[in-house]
Image: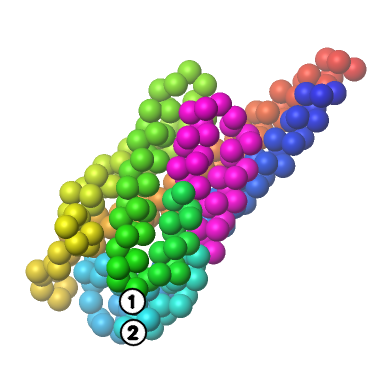
Amino acid sequence: MTQLNQSNKHYDLHLMIIFMSLATAVISGLGIGASLVAEVSRLGVSPLSIRADTLGDYMTSPLAIVYNMSLVVGGACLLLAMLARYYVFDDFYSRIITITGAALGGLIILIGIFPINFLEQHRFFSTGYLICTFMLHCFCFIDYFRKNSSLSTSLFGLTVVGLVFSVALMYLLNWTTLDFDPCTHAVNDICWVSLVMWILTQTNILWCVVLALNMRDMISVQQKYFSQLSLAES
């Protein structure tokens, strides 16, 4: 009976991870997408020539409030997902991943509160976000090769992509100013900083979606196991 009660507790926490991870992806994706469409329509330029962080500029971006609030709410949802994950995977290494993910959620909230208008704070929190993203993908990469890894193959694939592009973005960052040097490109040309930034952003959003799907599969396996255990005990 104790095992069944434990399974029910984990079932609720799994659901928390699923819904909060999906909420992170949906809210962030819709807010960023709407802001990007509005900016492209206003300027008539390629989306790949626009840096993601400029969408939060209250002075120039028409939907800056939507972009910034989507980061605040999305980051809060990620924090809640990581809080639930902390109690589901209670080994030391998994909790390191969870704490890193929670820190990432907190930094996303701070980026939404301090957009590019607050330049000094924004640079600090954005750099922290980049480093935290790199650390999270590093930990997840290592975790995949552990005996009792909680990562699926699809989640590992996104982890590899996130790791590659977080390293690329760190390489492009000017560590003296904690900002990226201006792109020298024509109006409709691709800005490489923007391209790498957008790929990393979309990878992180998809990572949250796949995390939710991974938890759903774990629920199915866990509930099937405890159902069989209950029948055996009866």
Q: In the current view of this chain or complex, which residue is farthest to the right? A: 234
Mark 1–mark 2 contact, CB under 8 Å?
Answer: yes
Q: Coloured how?
A: rainbow
The residue tagged 1 is 117
Q: How far apart are marks 1 and 2 (CA)?
A: 8 Å
Q: In the current view of this chain or complex, which residue is farthest to the top? A: 232
* Residue located at (30% from left, 68% from top): 120
Q: Is residue 25 visible?
A: no
* Residue located at (44% from left, 59% from top): 108
Q: In this view, does 226 lie to the left or right of 29?
A: right
Q: Identify which amino acid the numbered label 1 is placed on.
A: Asn
Q: Magenta segment range? A: 73-102
Q: Is residue 204 positioned above or below 30 on the image?
A: above
Q: Is residue 92 positioned above or below 197 on the image?
A: above
* Residue located at (18% from left, 49% from top): 171
Whether 87 is among the magenta residues is: yes
Q: Identify which amino acid the numbered label 2 is placed on.
A: Met
Q: Where is residue 88 in the image (x, y as percent from the top left)?
A: 63, 34
The residue tagged 2 is 59
Q: Position of residue 40 (x, y in %)?
A: 30, 77
Quarter location, residue 111:
bottom left
Q: Is residue 115 visible?
A: yes
Q: Mainly helix, strand or loop, the magenta region?
A: helix
Task: Name the N-terminal-most of marks 1 and 2.
Answer: 2
Q: Tell me the number on the disc at residue 192.
A: none
Q: In which quarter of the image is the C terminus?
A: top right
For mark 2, give the secondary structure: loop
